[in-house]
Amino acid sequence: MKVVKTLKHPITSHHRMLDATLHVYQEALTFLITVIQEQFMALESLSTQAVV
């Protein structure tokens, strides 16, 4: 039998280390949302399969 232990512990002392990663994620998401908003009307007439 395999025993697995999970420990949930919040990151409190090193949370600043993730700030740069969070910033990159937010920038990428902003870019994607902008593209989707700008191109939504052009994609509206296509089927879901065609869009994918």
Image (tube, helix red, strand yellow):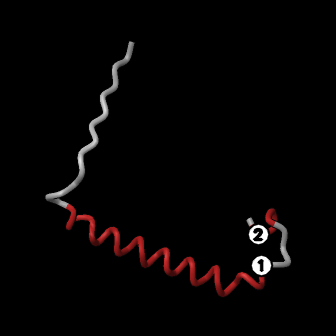
Q: In the rendered view, tell whether residue 19 sits above or below residue 3.
A: below
Q: Is residue 21 left or right of residue 52?
A: left
Q: Amino acid at mark 2?
A: Val
Q: Is disc 2 placed on a helix, strand or loop?
A: helix
Residue 47, position in %: x, y? 84, 68
For the N terminus, which image quadrant?
Answer: top left
Judged left or right of residue 28, residue 2 is left
Residue at position x 77%, y 78% in the image: 43
Name the image quarter holding residue 44. Answer: bottom right
Seen at 34% across and 20% down, the residue is: 3
Mark 1: which amino acid? Leu
Q: Residue at x 81, y 62 (%)?
A: 49
Dot 2 or dot 1, earlier in sequence: 1
Q: Which residue is mark 2?
A: 51
Residue 9 located left or right of residue 40 = left
**Do tag 2 and tag 1 residues touch (Cβ < 8 Å)?**
yes
Q: Mark 1 sits on what residue?
A: 43
42 relative to 12, above or below: below
Res. 17 mark: none
Q: Residue furthest bottom?
A: 38
Q: Quadrant of the C terminus?
A: bottom right
Q: Identify which residue is drawn at 76% across, 85% down.
A: 41
Q: Residues within 10 Å of mark 1 (few under 14, many from 20)?
A: few
> Compared to 50, does 6 lie above or below?
above
Q: CA distance from mark 2 to mark 1?
A: 7 Å
Q: Residues within 10 Å of mark 2 (few under 14, many from 20)?
A: few
Res 38 quadrant in image:
bottom right
Q: Residue furthest left?
A: 13
Question: SS at mark 1?
Answer: helix
